[in-house]
């Protein structure tokens, strides 16, 4: 299963971004092998409006079923629910640590 994390950069050592819709990157990782990850630049970050729903579409197209982030706005929350993506909020620290902690629960 794929898991997505908001990220300030394109690596697992980057910090979890504070905002979902306007984060710089998403890190998409396979929960069976988190070393197999893909950084995705968030093209929705510069959108004039509707960044959250656009960002939800991006991670859905990458097969993410879980999202790790600090905060999700109300518009993004609805879009994530439509795609069947579970948002886990209140996440901080390094992306690698956040993903490992979630996978090893």
Image (cartoon, rainbow, N blue to C red):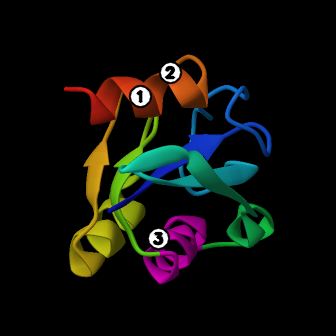
The residue at which mark 3 appears reads as 56
Bin the neighbour count of mark 1 within 10 Å (Cα to Cα): few under 14, some 14-19, many 20 and up.
few
Q: Secondary structure at mark 2?
A: helix
Nearest to viewer (mark 3 / mark 1): 1
In this rendering, would 27 be left or right of 10? left
Q: Secondary structure at mark 1?
A: helix
| Contact flag, marks 2 and 3 (Cβ < 8 Å) | no
Q: Residue at x 19, y 26 (%)?
A: 105
Q: Which mark is residue 82?
A: none
Bin the neighbour count of mark 3 within 10 Å (Cα to Cα): few under 14, some 14-19, many 20 and up.
many
Asked whether 5 falls inside the magenta stretch, the response is no
Main SS class of the magenta portion in the image: helix
Residue 9, image quadrant: top right
Foreground residue among 58 and 105: 105
Foreground residue among 82 and 64: 64
Q: Which mark is residue 100?
A: 1
In the image, is residue 74 above or below residue 84? above
| Contact flag, marks 2 and 1 (Cβ < 8 Å) | yes
Residue 56: percent from left, percent from top: 46, 70
Q: Which residues are magenta?
A: 50-62
């Amino acid at each position: 299963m794929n898991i997505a994390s908001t990220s300030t950069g394109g690596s697992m050592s980057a910090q979890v971004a504070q905002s979902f819709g306007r984060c710089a990157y998403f890190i998409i990782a396979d929960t069976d092998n988190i070393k197999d990850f893909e950084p995705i630049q968030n093209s929705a970050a510069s959108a004039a409006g509707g960044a959250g729903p656009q960002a939800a579409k991006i991670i859905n197209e990458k097969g993410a079923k879980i999202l790790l982030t600090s905060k999700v706005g109300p518009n993004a929350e609805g879009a994530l629910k439509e795609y069947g993506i579970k948002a886990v909020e209140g996440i901080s620290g390094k992306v690698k640590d956040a993903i490992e902690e979630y996978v090893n629960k």
